[in-house]
Image: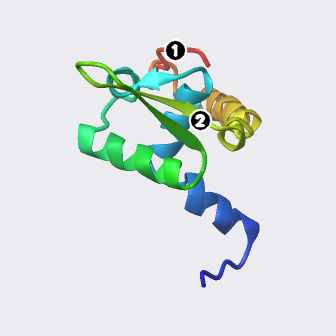
């Protein structure tokens, strides 16, 4: 039995870490293949991407769909539970934008894509 001392611990257990939030952010926008996610999530290795997707799938936030074709095609999408994180992830993006504007000197940080 796992013991948590507050609800934030539960949340961080499920979506915490360096990559889970980013992967969910892109999957919420629509289904993606592994290669698409690899291009979108800058700096993630193939091994870490697969591990992250497996953990999100095990948590019930992501679906994995295999297509019976050659070469094999796998597509990932958010479940209804995963989709319910959209307002939370959007709020985190907005907070990050405000933080960057207030904290970093002009020209010190560049965000290449608007969310």
The residue at 69%/35% (across/down) is 83
From the image, tell me which residue sits under label 2: 103
Q: Position of residue 115 (x, y in %)?
A: 62, 19
> Would you call the spot at circle 2 few (<14 residues within 10 Å), some (14-19), or many (20 or more)?
few
**In front of the other: label 2 or label 1?**
1
The residue at 60%/81% (across/down) is 2
Q: Position of residue 109 (x, y in %)?
A: 46, 25
Quadrant hosting residue 37: top left
**How many marks can you see?**
2
> Would you call the spot at circle 1 few (<14 residues within 10 Å), some (14-19), or many (20 or more)?
few
Horizontal side, residue 64 vs residue 3: left or right: left
Q: Position of residue 59 (x, y in %)?
A: 57, 55
Q: Quadrant of the N terminus?
A: bottom right
Horizontal side, residue 100 vs residue 38: left or right: right
Measure the C-alpha gap from mark 2 to mark 1: 19 Å
Instruction: Tell me the SS state at disc 1.
Output: loop
**Residue extending farthest front:** 68
**Residue extending farthest top:** 113
The residue at 70%/29% (across/down) is 94
From the image, tell me which residue sits under label 1: 113
Instruction: Tell me the SS state at disc 2.
Output: helix
Q: 85 above or below 36?
A: below
Q: 72 above or below 3?
A: above
Horizontal side, residue 76 vs residue 82: left or right: left
Q: Position of residue 36 (x, y in %)?
A: 38, 20
């Amino acid at each position: 039995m796992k013991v948590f001392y507050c609800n934030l611990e539960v949340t961080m257990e499920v979506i915490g870490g360096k990559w889970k939030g980013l992967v969910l952010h892109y999957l919420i926008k629509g289904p993606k293949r592994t290669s698409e996610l690899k291009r979108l999530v800058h700096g993630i290795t193939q091994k870490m991407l697969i591990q992250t997707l497996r953990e999100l799938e095990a948590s019930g936030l992501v679906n994995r769909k295999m297509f019976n074709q050659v070469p094999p095609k796998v597509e990932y999408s958010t479940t209804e539970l995963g989709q319910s994180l959209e307002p939370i992830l959007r709020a985190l993006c907005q907070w990050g934008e405000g933080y960057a504007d207030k904290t970093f000197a002009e020209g010190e940080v560049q965000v290449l894509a608007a969310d």
